[in-house]
């Protein structure tokens, strides 16, 4: 019997009137439901109700406090949210057990800036990376800010969900993945790094603290993007872009 997938691992929840209306207006997106606060009224609420009716999307009413809890945001929900089906999002454990396992995986560890998470999702998806681990804790939630930074690709990205980056790396190691850490101080250049042709996981650390201690001890190889001109490090999203397209060059990503 198949284990039910949590809604948190199936949907991207967007909140706020404009993001919800944009999701309802996009024919390429499947909206599971809209939740509208019972005290929401006026032109904006009416527009949302009409848009949902046109798409055949059910609208649930809830207290304003309940909407805040469901949105996970206390300031910007504006009394409305929508659960959008992310068709390629699934739990990491399911991706590893149902096969074929992703050839290359990115693990986000402590990346808390929504713009960086969004740009990484866009770049990695464009490069054909087969799995992007976005933990539920310690990494920016996939919310409207991440969706905007990804230019909407967050809805279509191959996101793999888990509780923590450390737990994800443990699972990956158990399934035979080599774990490579990206670190500016590493001795070996990414362009000189020897890699297996399958089952490689690259860890990208947070903007301030880098790779966490719990993940650090599980890394088997370290590498860096070579820099010159006195530049000490790249923004994590920029480093991810260099990594992703080096993997494209080597033929280690999904083609098309």
Image: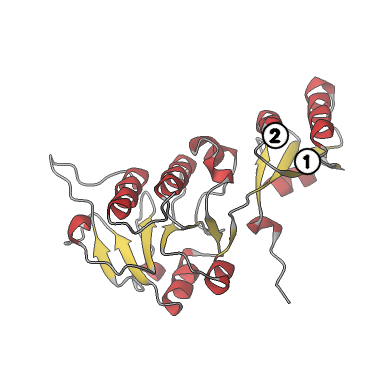
Image height of 118 relative to 167, above or below: above
Q: Quadrant of the N terminus?
A: bottom right
Whole-Å distance between the Cαs marked 2 and 1?
Answer: 8 Å
Q: Which residue is mark 1?
A: 34
Q: Quadrant of residue 104?
A: bottom left
Name the residue rendered at 66%, 30% in the picture. Answer: 22
Name the spot of residue 81 as percent of width and height, x first.
73, 40
Name the residue rendered at 34%, 59% in the picture. Answer: 252
Query: Does dot 1 land on a helix, a strand or a loop?
Result: strand
Name the residue rendered at 30%, 70% in the picture. Answer: 196
13 lies left or right of 135: right
Q: As rendered, which of 52 and 217 lies closer to the eye? A: 52
10 lies left or right of 65: left
Q: Which residue is mark 2?
A: 20
Q: As rendered, which of 126 and 10 lies closer to the eye? A: 126
Q: As rendered, which of 55 and 9 lies closer to the eye? A: 55
Find out whether the residues at labels 2 and 1 contact each other: C-beta distance under 8 Å: yes
137 lies left or right of 42: left
Query: Does dot 2 land on a helix, a strand or a loop?
Result: helix
Image height of 202 relative to 20, above or below: below
For marks 2 and 1, the one nearer the N-term is 2
Circle 2 packing at 10 Å, graded few (<14), some (14-19), many (20+), is many
Q: As rendered, which of 137 and 250 lies closer to the eye? A: 250
Name the spot of residue 173 as percent of width and height, x first.
41, 75
Q: Residue furthest front?
A: 256
Circle 1 packing at 10 Å, graded few (<14), some (14-19), many (20+), is many
Name the spot of residue 2 as percent of width and height, x first.
71, 73
């Amino acid at each position: 019997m198949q284990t039910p997938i949590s809604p948190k691992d199936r949907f991207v929840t967007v909140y706020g009137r404009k993001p919800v209306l944009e999701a309802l207006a996009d024919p390429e997106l499947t909206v599971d439901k809209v939740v509208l606060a019972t005290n929401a009224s006026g032109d904006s609420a009416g527009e949302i109700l009409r848009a949902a009716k046109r798409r055949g999307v059910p609208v649930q009413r809830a207290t304003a406090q309940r909407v805040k809890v469901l949105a996970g945001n206390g300031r910007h929900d504006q009394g409305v949210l929508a659960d959008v089906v992310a068709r390629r999002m699934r739990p990491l454990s399911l991706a590893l057990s149902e096969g074929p396992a992703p050839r290359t995986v990115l693990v986000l560890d402590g990346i808390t800036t929504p713009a960086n998470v969004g740009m990484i999702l866009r770049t990695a998806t464009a490069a054909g990376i087969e799995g992007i681990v976005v933990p539920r804790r310690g990494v920016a939630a996939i919310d409207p800010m991440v969706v905007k930074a990804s230019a909407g690709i967050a809805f279509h990205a191959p996101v793999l969900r888990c509780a923590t980056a450390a737990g994800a790396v443990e699972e990956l190691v158990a399934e035979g993945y080599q774990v490579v850490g990206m670190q500016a101080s590493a001795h070996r250049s990414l362009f000189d790094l020897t890699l297996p042709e399958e089952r490689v996981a690259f860890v990208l650390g947070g903007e301030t603290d880098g790779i966490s201690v719990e993940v650090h001890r599980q890394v088997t190889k370290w590498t860096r993007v070579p820099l010159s001109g006195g530049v000490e490090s790249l923004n994590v999203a920029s480093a991810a872009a260099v990594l992703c397209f080096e993997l494209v060059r080597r033929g280690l990503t999904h083609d098309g």
